Image: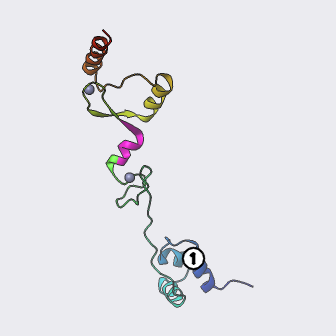
């Protein structure tokens, strides 16, 4: 049995809830009004739901235009690991790859946010070891 246009339109709406009525109409070379009518008869929505993306970091629904992250913070967190400086206690970010490489090589090594902190921390360790 050949599927009727009506059935095809309904199937397309069921298969893809994001597709717009206009897109369905252009696929079958029929008018948007006809698509709207078919879908209305079938009790299905004519307008496609806007596509929603989930944040790659926290998994929340993204409200903005980004397809990857819901916020700048999540973007930073995704690529960088927040680390607390062992010397001054400041929070800073280490690129994920660098963090993992160092963790694999030297897990006990201290994290310091800058060179002065690094030097200062070395002195602290030295004094503590006396
Ligand atoms: Zn997020
Ligand atoms: Zn520091």
In the picture shown, does residue 1 fall above or below 73?
A: below
The quadrant where residue 3 appears:
bottom right
Residue 31, given in percent of the width and then of the height, sits at 50, 84
Residue 109, image x and y in percent? Answer: 41, 22
Q: Please give the name of the residue rendered at 62% of the width and 80% of the height, measured from the top-left corner.
A: 8
The secondary structure type at the circle numbered 1 is helix
Q: Identify the residue shown where x is 25% and y is 19%.
A: 116
Q: Which residues are magenta?
A: 74-82
> How many marks are shown on the rendered structure?
1
Relative to 95, residue 102 above or below? above
> In the picture provided, is 1 more to the left or to the right than 95?
right
Residue sitting farthest toward the top: 130
Q: Residue furthest right?
A: 1
Classify the position of the N terminus by image quarter: bottom right
Q: Horizontal placement of 18 versus 130: left or right? A: right
Residue at which label 1 appears: 14
Q: Nearer the viewer, residue 96 or 44?
A: 96
Task: Locate the C terminus and report the quarter of the image it occupies.
Answer: top left
Q: Position of residue 94 (x, y in %)?
A: 37, 32
Residue 102 relative to residue 119: left or right:
right
**Render colour scheme:** rainbow
Please name whichever residue, 127 or 121, is drawn nearer the observer in this view of the structure: 127
Q: Residue sitting at 44 percent across and 55 percent down?
A: 59
Q: Is residue 22 magenta?
A: no
Which percent across, then down, holds residue 125?
A: 31, 15
Residue 31 vs residue 101, the one in the foreground: 101
Q: Main secondary structure of the magenta part?
A: helix
What residue is drawn where x is 46% and y is 32%? 97
Answer with left or right where residue 58 lies relative to residue 37: left
Query: Tag 1: Cα neighbours inside 10 Å, few (<14), some, or many (≥20)?
Result: few
């Amino acid at each position: 049995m050949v599927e009727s246009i009506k059935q095809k339109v309904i199937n397309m709406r069921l298969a893809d809830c994001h597709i717009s009525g206009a897109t369905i109409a252009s696929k079958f070379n029929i008018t948007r009004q006809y698509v709207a009518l078919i879908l209305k008869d079938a009790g299905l929505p004519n307008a496609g739901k806007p596509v929603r993306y989930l944040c790659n970091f926290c998994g929340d629904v993204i409200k903005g235009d980004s397809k990857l992250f819901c916020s700048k913070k999540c973007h930073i967190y995704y690529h960088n690991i927040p680390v607390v400086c062992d010397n001054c206690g400041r929070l800073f970010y280490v690129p994920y790859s660098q963090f993992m490489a160092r963790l694999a090589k030297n897990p006990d090594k201290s994290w310091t946010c800058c060179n002065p902190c690094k030097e200062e921390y070395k002195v602290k360790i030295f004094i503590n070891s006396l």
